[in-house]
Image (tube, coloured by chain):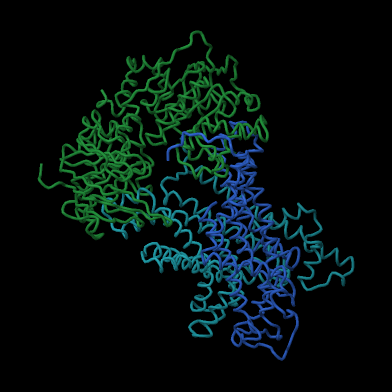
Amino acid sequence: MTSDTHVLPNAAPAVAWKRRTRLQRFAQVLTPLLARPGFALALLVVLFALVAAVVPHWLTSFDPYATSPAAKLTGPGAAHWFGTDELGRDLYTRVVYGASLSVQAALLAVGIALAGGLGLGVLAGFAGGRIDALIMRVVDVLLALPGLLLALAIVTAIGFGTVPVAIAVGVGIIPGFARTTRAEVLRVKTLPYVEAARLGGASWRRTLLRHILPNAWGPVAVLATLDFGAAILATAGLSFLGFGAAPPAAEWGTLIANGRHFLITAPWVSLLPGLFVVAVVFSLNHLARTFEENPR
Amino acid sequence: MSEHPLIAVRDLSVSYQAGGHVTQAVKCLSFSLAQGETVAIVGESGSGKSTLANALLGLLPGNAQVESGQLWVEGVDVARASEKQNRRLRGRTIGLVPQDPMVSLNPTLRVGQQIGEALVLAHGRRYRSLDADVLALLAQVGLDNPALRARQYPHELSGGMRQRVLIAIALAGNPRLIIADEPTSALDVTVQRKILDHLQRLVAERGISLLIITHDLGVATDRADRLLVMKQGELVEQGPPRQVVEAPQHPYTRALLDAAPAFNCHRRARVLAPGAQPILSLEGVGKTFELPKVKGQDNRFVALHDLNLQVHPGQTLAIVGESGSGKSTALRIALGLEAPSQGRILFDQVDVTGYGWRAFRPLRRRMQLVQQNPFAALDPRFTVFDSIVEPLVSFGVHQGPALEQAARELIARVHLPVSYLDRLPRELSGGQRQRVAIARALALQPELLLLDEPVSALDVSVQAQILALLDELQCELGIAYVLVSHDLAVVASMADHVLVLRQGQVVEQGTVDAVFARPTSEYTRELIAAIPGNKAAA
Amino acid sequence: MNRYLIGRIGQALLVLWGAYTITYFILYLLPGDTLAIMLSASGMEADGLSPEDLAKARAYYGLDKGLFEQYFDLLWRALHGDLGQSLSLNRPVTALLAERLPQTLSLAGLAIVLSLLGGIGLAYLTAYLQWRPLKVALSRLPSLGFSVPVFWMGLLLIQVFAFGLGWFPATGSQGFVSLVLPAVTLAIPSAAVYAQVLLRGFQGVWHEPYITTAFAKGLSRAQVQARHALRNAALPILTLVGLQVGNTVSGAVLVETIFSRNGVGRLAQEAVLRQDIPVVLAIVAVSAAAFVLVNLIVDLLYPYLDPRITHATKVT
């Protein structure tokens, strides 16, 4: 492609060539992705979970706490899509309402991890030298504490419940974010265009905000999506062990733990909520992978 | 010479399919190669020469398809043969010397093992004198201490040594043809020359045919018996080098010859203004790097030693050197990115040595840099407009409409259409990106422009365009240039003064005419002699 | 090399110390009233005690000392092998751990072996296949593998293999047969990670120029994959094994609970339920030690796999 030596006249108004905004460019990238069935399906599942988290009553008419001893342990059918549990509560409703607690917990966890991990990672990558070494040692220490055990320690100390579980999981995810952010910042920091910006007189603040962070964002966003799924699994695990919200609250982990006792006679009580969790997390992973393969 | 050519290509067409588009890489190509002949295929990127090489080996990627034609190699139509048949040809009939020696060897296997593998394949199984043969091959390709080299890993060898190992691997199977893919790109000029000479000698001794794939017309004319010029998949010209250079038939060949600096010295008649003060001068500059202490090794690395140079307004100083010569260090010191260990730097007669970042900042408006790699020099998220005006924004020079006006002027200056201001770097070609980088460098209206290998990553014809642009800008704006390059041909066409660096020391300095016509140092003579194309152009 | 070794060991000890300290602070500092927790763990109510009894209890638990003094005391004793007394079980923690550790180690050991075999095998097979539909399906499998909650997978496996087919017992810690299902359950997430990373590795390595060189010698696809691609693609796996220790320990807690095995994992769950602080602290410390040790070994093994990495100081 050789350049055109003909210069266009300035007849068009000044803003004529600034037509495409960032939003339009984003839409341009998103549309072909939606055409893919896998991506569209995954997006739908995730949206369903998010809607269930915020406005569960839109998706079901049952009351998650309403017991109905007569209808206990019925299998999946037309009236009860997921069947009922040992107290006759509609399982589908419990799963939908459980989304609220579980997704909120996961969001809180990822929020904590992002705040802590991003901050540490950017600081370490940008500052370098001693500060970098110190921060990385701290991250190493956090890594040495297995996620669940760290969460167990935190839960032992501050008590059971959804929020402590979320905090515990969040702290456990920080090392991953810190490392990824640091690696990206280090990579971008040495690229020629950053040097060019500095040579053009840009301050460190401008370089960081306009060049380094926007270009380092990609892998971090992918990790955030993946870790959202991991946070869901981790919070479910903790509530499965009995450290989550107290009954009759319907967290996903608690639901699965509950159904353990009826595994032989009524396996759907445990297995169907679990299947739902798998679907949500798998969809999140699929979204993350798609973003990774199609960088903007 | 046998009647049957070793290779006979007839009406070959190859296409690629990527993301719904079908691109024709090779169109109706026909040529033949006889035993013992050396043929060079010359073309720029997109000419289809690499596709042809891959097709000969039967190593076309999955999304490539041979649409029509035949590719006869020793009685086998490679285009239609099974993988098993093709595999028998590889190594034993056709050997490959790949392009970039730095990445073409398995980093986790010893060199001896990798050569041994090729020998085993040629013999069909392991045999007793395998180790001895490996050592013999290593000696033949010119490596010192073969016993040591065989035990080493690739990262312990230099680029030139790795290239020799790759030649050994290609020779291991006793092939009848060796394909050398861009054998000159990744190495220093003097190293290239030695290795290519050696390769040609080996090939001549054994009567092997050589097929050189290159973008460098000079290399092709120097070394081939016959030249094939390809453009966008088509064969446009064929013939012995002398004929092609002196009487090119096709306009594309003529354009290539025009653009290649070795063949067409557009040496400008530049009048040297008398008595003007140098805008930049380095006096006695030295740079030593401290290394971590290792027993038995000097822990200091001298990158530069006693460097003196001067750049006068409106003129071009070229710094020439191979890798490790210290030319990049010199540039970084001039830009204030590194502090020299000794000596001083004077910008417009003001001593700026040891200036901190803050103190240096105002000077940034007068001194700018154009970087080597146009593909990494622009922020991929910035539009062309954002990139070009960023220096203006950083210094707060213009705002709003004035900014847009400045952008318009700058992009016009580098001969790109105004509509490009809205584009992203990934929508531009290498040459266009380099123009944008130049426009950005001009934004603050500097008096001095430092150019670090500005055209080495570009195609030959695009190189010529960029160099012409730089020339024009210098004439119009009176900017001084410091041009760092390893390519002497580029230097000859652009520079007024030349400085030759070798391992941190200045070996030659003077006006272009003086240095090229009457080089005083042996190294400079070697460099000039190593310019490909000199033989045919002479 | 020796200086590097000493340096790394020092670093490892530092990390271990840091982990212990953080856990200590979480357990002893975060709670509102540590004494109340410890009392309830021992089965007593704080309200039902007189002030003198409270003071005696405080002294007994060592909570009457200053914060740092208490910390150093605990640390000192831990270094000498005394990890304190379990509040709920009234036994030395060290004895408890010694009892339960073999179970967990055998579980984790088998799980690691299975995960490596499964993960690497799956990735190798997927990379080798040329038939696109199967290849694509198999490459999605790892992603499914780490989307599945470990505990749910365990329940599913119990349902199918224990209750359904009756091949393996559903619970218990006796014999090798009871080890199979738990080990498989524990292995799946790690196997998924190894498979994913190795698959990515193969994809990346396949485009490297040295693969072309290998093909040009005349090697077949299988030979290239085995001799040239695998060694280079598998380099990150060693580091991963070190990092996965943490996940394995976490998973062990869940798996042992589901399969009712008498290991350290279930001990941890019981301890948290009863807020038995000394036990929790000890378990976390031991697993941190395991993590640090395994990563140290991995670090020292690395140069044998990747010759570009040397532990001597480099000269550029």
Q: Quadrant of residue B271?
A: top left
Chain C in the picture: what colour? cyan
- Which is nearer the eye, A255 or B397? B397
Q: Quadrant of residue C268?
A: bottom right
Q: Is residue A269 above or below residue B119?
A: below
| Residue B465 located left or right of residue B275 | left
**Residue farthest toward the top in the current orientation of the protein:** B275
Residue C92, visible in the rendered structure: no
- Which is nearer the eye, B338 or B210? B210
Residue B9 position, x and y percent, is 21, 49
What residue sits 68% from the left and 52% below the top? A116
What residue sits 78% from the left and 60% below the top? C62
The N terminus of chain B - image quarter = top left
Q: Quadrant of residue C47?
A: bottom right
Residue B148, visible in the rendered structure: yes
Q: Is residue C16 above or below residue A61?
A: above
Residue C244 position, x and y percent, is 54, 60
What residue sits 63% from the left and 28% below the top? B357
Residue B275 position, x and y percent, is 51, 8
Q: Which chain is blue?
A: A
Q: Is residue C295 above or below residue B133?
A: below
**Residue farthest toward the bottom in the current orientation of the protein:** A70
How many numbered discs, if any?
0
Residue B11 position, x and y percent, is 23, 50
Q: Which chain is green?
A: B
- Which is nearer the eye, B259 or A178? B259
